[in-house]
Amino acid sequence: MKLNTGARNQKSRSQPISGLDRFFHAVSERRIADAEKELDLIRSSIPATEAAKGNLKACEGLLLMVKANSDKYLYLSKIERTQKQLRMLRKEFATQATNTLHTDYDRGYFQVLESYMKKLEKLEPQSEIQVNKTPATESEH
């Protein structure tokens, strides 16, 4: 399973959905059990590189974010989920992912966050972004 999620690694629409994409989809919909299964598959298939370890740690952080009962200390849970804000965050994460002052681990970490923001940008309509909603509010859709 390929974890390189940088902007240079664009996929065509005809390619199958990767494990990372399935993980992002499950996280965005707060399907914790599915996200954990995908994370286990990702964990078992990553290469032993620092960038891959950063990728994995970012995924673990995203999963912890949706599992948390309190958003008090969670940055991504507190952000305003508008297209403009998501685009700004994605660009910032992309900048950090390519910053040569960061270690490979850090660049890998930011690559995953960049890809996650890209996934959230594509969700429509914006009112359906579920990351910071409780499962009780999901039934309103």
Image (cartoon, rainbow, N blue to C red):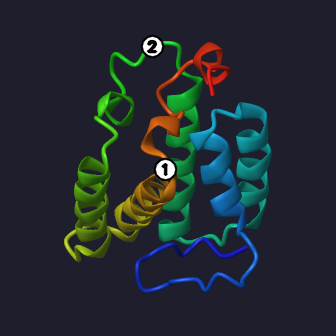
- Residue identifier under label 2: 70
Residue 90 location (% of width, % of height): 31, 60
Q: In screen coordinates, is 107 left or right of 28?
A: left
Say which amino acid is labelled 2: Ser
Compared with residue 11, is residue 121 higher up or lower down, i.e. above or below? above
Could you tell me which residue is drawn at 36 percent across and 27 percent down? 74
* Lower position in the chain sequence, tag 1 or tag 2: 1
Residue 4 location (% of width, % of height): 54, 75
- Locate residue 31: give its quadrant: top right
Q: Which mark is residue 58?
A: 1
**Mark 1 secondary-structure assignment:** helix
Q: Which mark is residue 79?
A: none
Residue 39 location (% of width, % of height): 70, 49
Q: Nearer the viewer, mark 1 or mark 2?
A: 2
Q: Nearer the viewer, residue 109 or 131?
A: 131
In three-dimensional space, the C-alpha distance between marks 1 and 2, rounded to whole angstroms, equals 19 Å
Could you tell me which residue is drawn at 66 percent across and 72 percent down? 47
Say which amino acid is labelled 1: Ala
- Locate residue 81: give its quadrant: top left
